[in-house]
Amino acid sequence: VVPGRYLARDQADGSNPGRGYIRVAMVQDQDTTAQALHRLVAVLG
């Protein structure tokens, strides 16, 4: 998991389209990934 702003470029107006998002690598099987995403939602809301 990394902050979305790390992988996006700042715009001319200073905004960053990735700000406010996270990036998650989904590299496990579907069931494990689903469990992990449910846990993230429980923590992050």
Image (cartoon, helix red, strand yellow):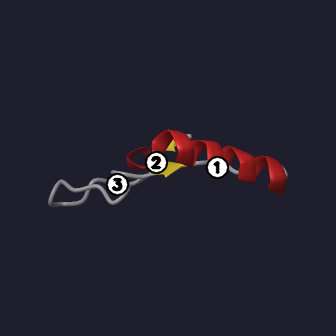
Q: CA distance from mark 3 to mark 1?
A: 29 Å
| Mark 2 neighbour class, 10 Å CA radius: few under 14, some 14 to 19, many 20 or more | few
Query: Which residue is labeled 2 in the image?
Result: 45
> Residue 27: in sight, yes or no?
no
**How many angstroms separate mark 1 from mark 2 (CA)?**
10 Å
Residue drawn at x 35%, y 51% is 20
Mark nearer the N terminus (3 vs 1): 3
* Residue at mark 1: 38
40 sits to left or right of 22? right
Front in this rendered view, residue 8 or 18: 18
Q: Which secondary structure lies at badge 1?
A: helix
Q: Residues within 10 Å of mark 3 (few under 14, many from 20)?
A: some
Horizontal and vertical percent for residue 29? 85, 52
Kindly give the residue lying farthest to the left in the view shown. Answer: 13
Could you tell which of marks 1 and 2 lies nearer the N-terminus?
A: 1
Q: Please name the residue shown 73% across and 53% down the image.
A: 34
Taking depth in this image into account, of 27 and 8 the one nearest to the observer is: 27
Name the side, left or right, on which 6 lies relative to 33. left
Q: Residues within 10 Å of mark 1 (few under 14, many from 20)?
A: few
Q: Quadrant of the N terminus?
A: top right
Amino acid marked by disc 2:
Gly
